[in-house]
Amino acid sequence: MKELDPLLHSQLRLAVMSVLMNVEEADFVYLREKTESTAGNLSVQLDKLAAAGYITVEKGFSGRKTRTVCRVTPAGRAAFVAYVDTLREYLNL
């Protein structure tokens, strides 16, 4: 049986990817609210997903405030689909 992707097996990273799979993009505040995580923990997990090439992270400004926008990449989309397919195999669905 195939192994689950350990990068996506983390609860917070899986939650982030689940949100991003359903939207074109999401900003940091939105992801923090949806995942109910702390800013520090979310930041670390976004860095890990970005380093793996699963998401892109763009930092910029909206007026005087910083704005961080995340998008899932084609590689991230494929990894997520593979993760879900493997989970289905485990559950015999």
Image (cartoon, helix red, strand yellow):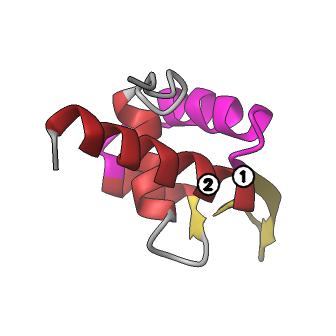
Q: Position of residue 17 (x, y in %)?
A: 49, 51
Residue under the image location 34 percent in, 47 percent down: 35
**Percent from the top left, x then y, of residue 72?**
65, 60
Q: Residue at x 35, y 55 (%)?
A: 33
- Whether residue 54 sits left or right of residue 28 in the image: it is right
* Residue beneath disc 1: 75
The kind of residue tagged 1 is Ala
| Label ID, residue 57 | none
In the picture shown, does residue 71 fall above or below 87? Answer: below
Q: Nearer the viewer, residue 31 or 61?
A: 31
What residue lies at 42% left-to-right and 61% top-to-bottom? 19
Examine the structure image and report whether residue 82 is included in the region drawn in magenta. no
Tell me: 24 left or right of 85. Answer: right
Determine which residue is flagged by label 2: 78
Q: Spatial distance from mark 1 to mark 2, Cα to Cα?
A: 5 Å
Q: Is residue 93 visible?
A: yes
User: Of helix, strand and loop, which mostly describes the magenta segment?
Assistant: helix
Would you say residue 38 is visible in this rendering?
Answer: no
Q: Name the side, left or right, on which 38 lies relative to 46.
A: left
Considering only vertical position in the picture, is 53 above or below 58? above
Q: Which residues are magenta?
A: 35-55
Q: Is residue 67 left or right of residue 21?
A: right
Q: Quadrant of residue 34?
A: bottom left
